Amino acid sequence: MRIWSTLCSLFTIVSIVPMAHGETMKTAAYGAWKSPVSAASLTESAIRLGEIRLDGGDLYWLEGRPEEGGRQVIVRRMADGTTRDVTPPGFNVRSRVHEYGGGAYVVAGGVVYFSNFADQKLYRQAPGAAPRALTPAGYCYADCVISARLNAAICVREDHTKKGEVDNTLVAVDLTAGGAGRVLVSGTDFVSSPRLAPDGRRLAWVSWNHPNMPWDTTSLWVADLDQQGGLKNRRLVAGGKAESVIQPQWSADGALYFLSDRSNWWNLYAWSAGKTTRIVDVPAEIGEPQWVFGQSSYALVSKDEAIVRLLSNGFAALARVNLNSGVLTRLALPFVSLHQVRAGQGGVYFLGASATAPEGLYQLVGDGVRELRKSREANLARDAISRAEPIAFATGDGATAHGFYYPPTNPHYRAPAGTRPPLVVILHGGPTGMALPAFNAEVQFWTSRGFALVDVNYRGSAGYGRAYRNLLRKNWGVADTRDAVEAARYLVAQGKADAKKLLIRGGSAGGYTVLSALAFYDVFSAGADYFGISDITSLVKETHKFESRYIDNLIGPYPEASQIYKERSPINHLDGFSAPLIVFQGLDDQVVPPNQSEAIVKALRKKGVPVAFLTFKGEGHGFRMKRNIIRSREAELYFYSRILGFTLPEKIAPVAIDNLD
């Protein structure tokens, strides 16, 4: 493991590679520039970092490895700086609770407990020993904490042993005898974030019910935990209607901290002796939507100090907080994206990325950082990196939406005079997700070829406060779609995009917005839909429990609002489709079933619209395998080259496009 430079302000910036002496810039059409970022390079020596954990002086994290079929591996870094894989071959540390997972492992006293993706059993792995299953088949586990008093792992459990909707409960799994677990908390549709007080005698957790999502309305509870695992004296700490409470943490002195958006922003609060105090009052988000378990946007460093992640206008920053006075001091660090802020015996750790450096694992040292692990190398000269430019634009219906514009950037090329670049409009998923301005090799894949991009934080996106998230309520398929269209129009008006070469791409909910834009607007030349939704009525009947009532708030309850479901389903508006479309779908997707893609492709083929369709075995909601990531990106590039009529400088396997010729 390489540890960079000294112990103060150690942040790696991409090395500057000057143009060779005498080399001249080439003139070529936008989109046809030869790029140093190949589709293969998106996965070569690249990993996904996640789920930081601390155990004594040891540091643990997850690595998702495309070159190992997307397998997730626990890595341990010991106090002396040596690292090694903990997870043996044949195991994949990934939970399927809520399908999106997270909170897939916990460490206590050097013993690792983890969910294995293939069978979803909870395993115990002692140092030097092989993993041993603790639980039977038919259940999924996540977000566990270890209770020494009970000799148990207290976990969120999904029960898949019965027909119908799965049961979500908090259970205690005996660490010696194993078993499916004894139910501690039930009676609500969802539970998360079990957290034990330092003395092990109080348990906090979060719950919510349909049709709410955890960023809509949740409740934070505390109960006394007796020696037999019984819960007594249950009381509501925070939450209720129109308040999202997330990420509870106990301090060493027994105070319970949490994030609440009751002020419009997820700010930090503390509950002690029955009294709640607001610690931080700032118009910025400390938290983010709980799509996965195990999120951590702040860390309690001592009884007097916390480190928090602030997100304001799309940009993230770290800050120190005095827990007594609430005084907040921002740290002068180059990161624009921050996650997994954790503190323990070894210090403060987090995942961070800047505008020019990919995400890495860092340790906070004083007011600087030490890099411990990279997700990948940037492999680009600084002048070859396209940097995000924040934009805000009118939506045409009285609101303002946001996004990040990336200009085409390649120091070796220029476009013919008087031409403007094709624009790729990107829609994130969720729809309560967010676009961040951090270095992303996929963005550079396009910009280095001469494409401009705009990553749209349409109404409903996180990072701009609860009120902005709520602008999508009852307006899904309308506000988000309009924002995508108006972002493109805005950049055309600014002279930053060619009005005849506008492209739109997105996945999941973003894929739905792609289809809606093509169905209801004649603006885009082509679209790329990654596992998007074409028929909302069908989806609401088939999707998993976590999101099965999500659309109640986004559109309206079903079947009462069934007519609106029909009106906003792209599959019912085929007359509006004329632009070519490429569709990508994982065949194991449980969130957006493959029939959503199959239906729109079949209908467009019949109508005569140019359409390409690629499916991937073994992939779920998002692609993790190296070969599939490469194939999908190359196929999308090839598709755009055919539609826009430019010649690619590299050889790419062709894609069959029905109805094109």
Image (cartoon, grey):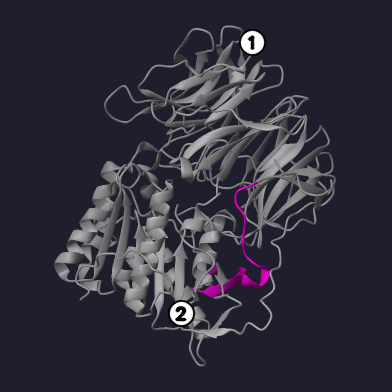
- Real-space Cα separation, disc 2 to disc 1, in angstroms: 61 Å
Judge left or right: residue 574 versus residue 195.
Answer: left
Q: Nearer the viewer, residue 29 or 339?
A: 29
Mark 1 = which residue?
Answer: 149
Is residue 28 shown above or below 314?
Answer: below
Judge left or right: residue 655 versus residue 342.
Answer: left
Part of the protein shown in magenta: 374-402
Q: Residues within 10 Å of mark 1 (few under 14, many from 20)?
A: some
Give the position of the C terminus as an image quadrant: bottom left
- Residue 489, labelled with which disc? 2
Give the position of the N terminus as an image quadrant: top right
Tell whether position 127 is magenta. no
Looking at the picture, which amino acid does disc 2 mark? Arg
Residue 490: x, y in percent? 50, 79
Residue 543: x, y in percent? 32, 42
Residue 581: x, y in percent? 30, 67
State whether residue 491 appears in this view: yes
Looking at the picture, which amino acid does disc 1 mark? Arg
Is residue 257 shown above or below 533?
Answer: above
State whether residue 477 appears in this view: no
